[in-house]
Amino acid sequence: MLITRYITVFLCLLVAAGTAAAQSPQASENEAQASPVTVFSHSDSDRYWVSGQVNWISQWHPPFHSPYQGPNSLTPQAQDASSHVLTLYLAYRPARWTQLVLDVEDSTGGGLGNAVGLAGYTNLDVVRISQGVPLSHAPYVARALIRQIIPLSDRREDAERSPLNLWSSLPAYRLEFWFGKFSLVDFFDENGVVGDDHFGFMNWTVLNNGAYDYAANTRGYTDGAIIALEAPGWSVRFAEALMPRVANGIHLEANLARARSENAEVAFRLPGLAGEKATVRLLGFVNHANMGSYAQAVDAFLAGQTPVPSITDHPRRVAVKYGFGVNLEQPLAEWLGIFGRWGWNEGQHESFAYTEVDQTIEVGLAGTGQHWGRPADHFGGAFVSNGISRIHQQYLKLGGSGFMLGDGRLRYAREEIGELFYTVHLWRGLFPALDLQAIRNPGYNADRGPVFVVSLRLHVEL
């Protein structure tokens, strides 16, 4: 069976990576700490940044119970799919407090069931396809940003260098301005315990707040501006961003009178458990776009005006969708932490940019292998429960489809997801991982599933 092959391959890699653990614990820990985590070394002082990554994910699920299927159902027959993402990161500081960022990606492959049928889809890397046609046959610009910092104090605090930050320390009090092309979840709904999707979890609604219908094109990027006020114990951020012209569309609407998104977040760093600081983030967003109304689509169908409820069958107008989120991260030790999220949006208007979730709640635990002498290994487990509004339920029950869901019928139940993963630092920048996901009531449908998904990921950090 394919699942046996996946697990066998991963266990072989784990055994190879664990050979050093046969040494004394102290020697193993020292060696692990000294082992580079990138193929090429990166300077801590340069005004430049050049790096890259390769992320390959192969997923498989066995057959599952499915008495019927609709236009956007996850295929119940056993299947596998692979996605591949290559990224080149470039950054430069032309002045003391100014930074330029350019990120070029090349994404190929696809997802299980053409990446539909689940609200909490199993692979954040997947490039969604339309009628079997990939979104791109060539590299594209994912991020192109200008960052300007205005110091508000002489006091400095340590900062981790990355493509988005070329400073090893920053003013403790500062204003920041970002302008250009970016992903909103680079700056909003962040969670340090959940971590990076290339090293950790894979499910959309584990990595991000599923009810946060954040402005983005199909690939997850938008154009806009961000202003942030940063302080040691708190921060405030606001973003104005472009929305797609149609739900899950690749093209953004440049006319702000027709479509736009406002996003605001306040973060507090508070005394927490085990002597570690907890971080609480409070998020709010308001989207303006040419969105359909579930109630109007249902009423038109019941009146015989449409053969099935159609969320896109309406004249052009500007509708408003809003929502809120709470995000908690609590380190328990240097190597271990817990996290949680809650999210809600009004659920009356069309899911437009991220996925079809109107309410979500999430809890989990994640960490590194530092405790057993492998600080570059990553592991974690999470549980997510997603839901939709009553009118959204009725729309799907009567045969309507969104850009992610549509079984033709619906016996509603909350979609529940459990995910476990372990990522091994095999050598320098080589990180294989095994991920297991169990999904109950896929697409909120109690008549279908459960679905079990096995994933093997190979991440190369250049």
Image (cartoon, helix red, strand yellow):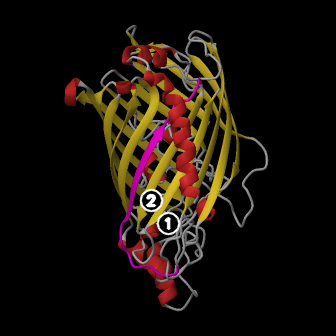
Location of residue 14 in the rendering, given as x and y in whole percent from the top left corner: 51, 36
Whether residue 72 is situated above or below residue 426 in the rendered picture:
below
Q: Which residues are magenta?
A: 408-428
Location of residue 165 by image quarter:
top right
Q: Is residue 409 left or right of residue 144?
A: left
The residue under the point 45% across, 71% down is: 449
Give whichever of 229, 379 is nearer the camera. Answer: 379
Local packing at callout 2 (Cα closer than 10 Å; few below 14, some 14-19, many 20+) is many
The secondary element bearing badge 1 is classed as: loop
Q: Which of the two residues, 335 or 179, is positioned nearer the viewer here?
A: 335
Q: Is residue 275 left or right of residue 62?
A: left
Say few, some or many: other residues with alpha carbon within 10 Å of mark 1 (under 14 / 14 to 19 / 20 or more): many
Residue 423 lies in the magenta stretch: yes
Task: Tell me the kind of residue under disc 1.
Answer: Glu
Report the front residue among 71 and 218: 71
Residue 271 position within the rendered picture, expressed as x and y whole percent measured from the top left: 21, 27
Specify the quadrant that holds the N terminus: bottom right
CB atoms of marks 2 and 1 within 8 Å:
yes
Identify which residue is drawn at 62% across, 16% down.
Answer: 41
Q: Is residue 117 above or below residue 239?
A: below
Would residue 75 be seen by someone viewing this image from the given angle?
A: yes
Q: Give the residue type that dot 2 points to.
A: Lys
Determine the residue positioned at 40% across, 7% down.
154
| Residue beneath disc 2 | 321
Identify the residue under disc 1: 350
